Image (cartoon, rainbow, N blue to C red):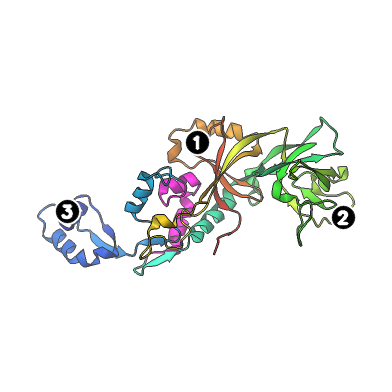
C-alpha cells in the first residue's frame, strides 16, 4: 500500500524529485508505472535514491532515537547529544555549519560513515568568525594580586572578535581579587608547562603581567588560593622595558564583577564508533560521560543582560541562542530551554581544537 500511495501523493503535491534511500531503488519501476498510469491531474515526479547518512558514535534510526527518548536515556528529542535538528540547534549548531557539512559530504550511493569531527569542524569554522569572545572560568580558583591596592578597580577594553573588528569591543574590570582556571596553576610544574607556578611570569589577557609567588592550601592539601604580584608598568600586557614573556597568556575574571553559571559539557552519546553495528545492542554502547554538569562557573556580569533579552524572545526553542567563545576553553551557547537571567546555563557546542578521542 505504501508503494501505491507514495507516488500518488508525490504527484498530487507537485513533488519534482522524490529523494529516497537505497532500499527503494528496486521499487522505482512500480513508482514510475503508477505516476504514468494513474488517471489524476499530476506533475510526474522523479524518484532518486541515495545512501543514508551515517555518522560515527551515534545512531540515526528513528526507532532507536525514539527508544532513547521514551526510555529517558536523554532528556528529549532536543537533547543536545541527539543527532536531530532541534538537538543540534540547542547545542549551538548553526544552519550554516549544517549546510557546509552537507556540502562537504555530498550525496552518493555508497554506504558511508562520516566522522562526527567533520561536523564539529564545520561549526568551529563558522563560530570562529561570528562568536563574541568573553571571559569565563569553568573550574575556578581564586587568584589574589597581593601588591594591587585593596578596594581599587580599573577598566580594560577587549575586542569582541579579533577576526572581525566590526563586532566592536566591550569593557571588563580588574581588581585585586580574580578567578582563574584551576588547571592554570601547578605548584610543581611539569616539563613545558608555561602557565602559573611559583616564580613564573605570565600575561593576564588584556590586563597586566603577573608573577606567581605561591599559593594557599586547605587542611587536605588542596589549593584554595593562588598568589601573585603584578607589574604596574605593564598595563595592557606590554611591559615598559620591552622584555619578552615566555609564560602563557591566561584568561581571568574579576571576582568582584562576575556571576555564577551552570556549564554543561557534552561528549559523544556513544563510546562505540558504530553503536548500531552487527551483533550489538546500541544501549550497551552508551557513553556514561556524555554529559558533565559544572556548577559555580564564573562568567562576565553582562551575561545577565544578554539572558534578559533572550528571555524576551518568542519561540526560544526554535531559534539559535546567543553563542560565545569562552577564551581558551571553547564555543558555548545559552541553553534555549533552561537558561534565564536568574540561572545562567551554557552548553558547550564544540571545543576550540579538535580533541577527538581516537
Residue at the spot 87% in from the left edge and 42% down from the top edge: 232
x and y percentages locating residue 305 in the rendered image: 59, 31
- Residue farthest to the right, as pictured: 241
Residue at the spot 58% in from the left edge and 34% down from the top edge: 306
* Residue located beneath label 2 in the image: 243
x and y percentages locating residue 356 in the rendered image: 55, 60
* Residue located beneath label 3 in the image: 5
Q: Which element type, helix, strand or loop, lies under badge 3?
A: helix
* Residue located beneath label 1 in the image: 338
How far, Cα to Cα, is label 3 from label 2? Answer: 77 Å
What span is in magenta?
A: 80-107
Q: Which element type, helix, strand or loop, lies under badge 2?
A: loop
Reply yes or no: does residue 83 show up in magenta.
Answer: yes
> Which corner quadrant holds the C terminus?
bottom right
| Whether residue 300 can be seen here | yes
- Magenta stretch, overall SS: helix
Mark 1 or 2: in front is 1
Amino acid at each position: 500500500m505504501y508503494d501505491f500511495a507514495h507516488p500518488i501523493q508525490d504527484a498530487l503535491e507537485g513533488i519534482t524529485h522524490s529523494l529516497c534511500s537505497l532500499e527503494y531503488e528496486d521499487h522505482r519501476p512500480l513508482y514510475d508505472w503508477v505516476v504514468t498510469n494513474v488517471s489524476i491531474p499530476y506533475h510526474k515526479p522523479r524518484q532518486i535514491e541515495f545512501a543514508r547518512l551515517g555518522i560515527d558514535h551515534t545512531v540515526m534510526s528513528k526507532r532507536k532515537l525514539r527508544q532513547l527518548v521514551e526510555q529517558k536515556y536523554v532528556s528529549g528529542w532536543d537533547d543536545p547529544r541527539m543527532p536531530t535538528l532541534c538537538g543540534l540547534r540547542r547545542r549551538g549548531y548553526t544552519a550554516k555549519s549544517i549546510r557546509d557539512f552537507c556540502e562537504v559530504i555530498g550525496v552518493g550511493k555508497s554506504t558511508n560513515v562520516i566522522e562526527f569531527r567533520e561536523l564539529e569542524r564545520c561549526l568551529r569554522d563558522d563560530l570562529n568568525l561570528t562568536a563574541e569572545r568573553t571571559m569565563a572560568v569553568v573550574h575556578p580558583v581564586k587568584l589574589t594580586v597581593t601588591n594591587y591596592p585593596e578596594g581599587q578597580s580599573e577598566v580594560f577594553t577587549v575586542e569582541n572578535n579579533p577576526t572581525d573588528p566590526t563586532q566592536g569591543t566591550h569593557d571588563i574590570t580588574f581588581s585585586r581579587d580574580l578567578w582563574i582556571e584551576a588547571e592554570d596553576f601547578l605548584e610543581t610544574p611539569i616539563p613545558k608547562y608555561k602557565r602559573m607556578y611559583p616564580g613564573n611570569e605570565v600575561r593576564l589577557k588584556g590586563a597586566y603581567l603577573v608573577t606567581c609567588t605561591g599559593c594557599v592550601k586547605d587542611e587536605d592539601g588542596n589549593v584554595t588560593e593562588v598568589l601573585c604580584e603584578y607589574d604596574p608598568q605593564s598595563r595592557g600586557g606590554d611591559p615598559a622595558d620591552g622584555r619578552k614573556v615566555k609564560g602563557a597568556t591566561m584568561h581571568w575574571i574579576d571576582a568582584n564583577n562576575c556571576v555564577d553559571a551552570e556549564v554543561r559539557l557534552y561528549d559523544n552519546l556513544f563510546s562505540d564508533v558504530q553503536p548500531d553495528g552487527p551483533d550489538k545492542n546500541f544501549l550497551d554502547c552508551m557513553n556514561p560521560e556524555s554529559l558533565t554538569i559544572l556548577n559555580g562557573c564564573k562568567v562576565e556580569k553582562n551575561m545577565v543582560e544578554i539572558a534578559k533579552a533572550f528571555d524576551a524572545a518568542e519561540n526560544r526553542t526554535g531559534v539559535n541562542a546567543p553563542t560565545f567563545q569562552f577564551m581558551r576553553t571553547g564555543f558555548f551557547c545559552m541553553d534555549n530551554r533552561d537558561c534565564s537571567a536568574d540561572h545562567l546555563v551554557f552548553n558547550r557546542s564544540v571545543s576550540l581544537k579538535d580533541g577527538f578521542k581516537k
